[in-house]
Image (spheres, helix red, strand yellow):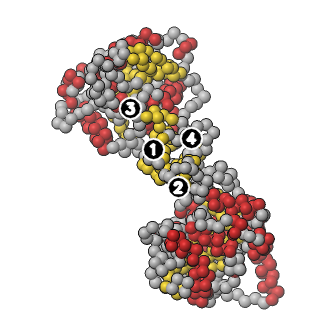
Amino acid sequence: MKISYQSNTTPHKILNIRVAGKLLSFMFLWYGMFSTALAQERIPQANEGFDVNKTSIPHGKIDTITYTSKTVGVQRRALIYTPPGYSKGKKYPVLYLLHGIGGDEKEWYNGGKPQNILDNLYADGKLVPMIVVMPNGRAMQNDRPVGNIMAPDKVAAFATFEKDLLTDLIPFVEKSFPVIKDREHRAIAGLSMGGGQSLNFGLGNLNTFAWVGAYSAAPNTKQPQELVPDPEKTKKQLKLLFISCGASDNLVSFSKRTHDYLAAKEVPHIYYIEPGVHDFKVWKNGLYMFSQLIFKPVDVSSFPLYSSTLNSTTSPAGMPASTNIPGVKYPQILPDNRVFFRVKAPQAKEVIIDLTKKFPMQKDTGGYWTVTTEPIVLGFHYYSLIIDGVAVVDPASQTYYGMGRMASGIDIPDPDAEYYAIKNIPHGQVRLINYYSNLTQAWRRAYVYTPANYDNSSKKYPVLYLQHGSGEDETGWTAQGKMNFILDNLIAEKKASPMIVVMDRGYATDPTKPAGNVAGMNGNIFPEVLIKEIIPMTERTFRTLPDRNNRAMAGLSMGGFQTFQTTMTHPDMFAYVGGFSGVGFIQPNTDVTQMYNGVWADAEKFNKQIKVLYMSIGTTEPERMYTGVNGFHKALEKAGIKHVYYESPGTAHEWQTWRRSLRQFASLIFKD
């Protein structure tokens, strides 16, 4: 015995009842009518906890068995599950449960915990007692999943397993265990490559199997015409064919083509497409549902009950991303925040999604490349397609200026996203202003938010100058940051004062001087442009309250550093200051009170002068960024400088950190 899984709970007692002729016939008739009535109820999707080990119920047992394979010429292994109350004095039907291309006889045990699923169903009285055999479907002498699992000889071994199963394993099981030896008491099912084997072997040997299940059947699945060459004969022999797949599985087309053929030929079957991708979440649910259906009377009239709006590759479990081009279905965001991408590039040799990390895509026979990512943290993220080594935008996505170029973007929904959602309330406007800069000797542009009803009154407003980060531009705060909706909602809820917001490009150079590092502060004269040109232009063009008590500046990352550089050297011009993931550069062992011409040397004076000093950081930001902002916060705290410090939980150097920060900062400024 290699693996054991057994409970100390006393097994169910087995009651042997002998009845004669007419009574037995009556009982079978009654049972058939009763079971048929039950069969008309649709087996539901598994509930949470269906695969959890419960100590309070009887348990089955898992052992390793070894059999002689004449097909392969070696001793081979399989796992075998015997149900609670197992007795050699009773005969059982058998389910042969197959693994995927990267697994072996232990894949179901390690990844699917079938013993827990089955034990729990037995405890609820939902299963016919059965033996479950989990073999190694790679029929070759070295059948371990090592090296290149896609090597031709290893792939061929999955086809060879048909002979091993029929001529070696099944005879061994039927000789060694008390099983019922007819087709109506044999079932075969499997996941992925094993799902393809189940369809190939099960439908190809209906004299051996009457029950067939395929979960996420892989490309090894034969063409439907080969699987079911004689639909009428299949209808007569087949008890149940169960096909399931995750709606966002990139292999769903293989399940669908089989379903479409069977439907056209009117071969009864269950086609169940559920939310999910190519993983054990789907496969475990497949076992949960299929095991409850087999070895019982079947009513085909119940099969349509398993259809749903998900039973189409055009209606997958995910929802189209809000950042998609209108009407485009992919990429899709799954319920667990994984993202399913589908891109057509038939001539490409390699396609990769670059979204927080790189995800290689797989190509299907139609020239479509697909991949499902790991869960992506909520909020807005830039991404690119890397096609044969070249990073390009996704034609399915809207584009945004970020990463120093135009990029695709995707917004993972935040459960707390109401604060930047579009609502049926009065809305402000975002205006594009072009102006000539004498300092840069070039035309520049700014986006300016004016609050609702700005044009219908003579009221004057305070102004917030709001800056973007490195690699972004003046479009960022509206396109990626949703600042206009954040302000609309805050103002409508009377949580923020109506204000004008000016968003300008944070890069500016003096053509008469040598170029420096424009992305940072070296050679970037933006603070000078803001003080000498942008603020005067704004106060000439819009109805503003032109004094320091009605002027604020804030920015993210690079814009945060620019904010501190500008405001701390001009404290007479601003009363409100905010740095989101960016504040001031402080060197080790530097006295913060000596920075910016000693603006913090007199804490009492500064605290009276600056009404709100705000800084924030995401809790999962890069260590250098986090320690820099947090260290600055501690240094100001030590110097007695009053300020607001906020850490955005679970977010990194990204727009969700900055959206949250703006929401807080805007609610604090321009208030008595």
- Packing grade of label 2 (10 A; few <14, some 14-19, many >=20) is some
Q: Quick one: SS at disc 2?
A: strand
Identify the residue under disc 3: 469
Does residue 279 sit above or below 568 in this rendering? Answer: below
Which of discs 3 and 4 lies nearer the camera? The answer is: 4
Q: Amino acid at mark 2?
A: Gln
Residue 202: which numbered mark, if any? none
- Dividing the picture into quarters, in which one does residue 468 lie? top left
Does residue 278 sit above or below 64 in this rendering? Answer: above
Q: Earlier in the sequence, mark 2 or mark 4?
A: 2
**Rendered residue at 72%/69% (across/down):** 228
Q: Earlier in the sequence, mark 1 or mark 2?
A: 2
Horizontal and vertical percent position of residue 668: 40, 26
Horizontal and vertical percent position of residue 99: 54, 70
Q: Amino acid at mark 1?
A: Val
Q: How far is mark 1 from mark 4, CA to CA? A: 17 Å
Identify the residue under disc 4: 396
> Left or right of 617: which side holds 110?
right
- Packing grade of label 3 (10 A; few <14, some 14-19, many >=20) is many
Q: How far is mark 2 from mark 4, CA to CA? A: 18 Å
Identify the residue under disc 2: 362
Asked if disc 1 and disc 3 are in contact, CB closer than 8 Å, the reply is no
Q: How far is mark 2 from mark 3, CA to CA? A: 34 Å
Identify the residue under disc 1: 390
Q: How far is mark 1 from mark 2, CA to CA? A: 17 Å
Q: Quick one: SS at disc 1?
A: strand
Q: Quick one: SS at disc 4?
A: loop
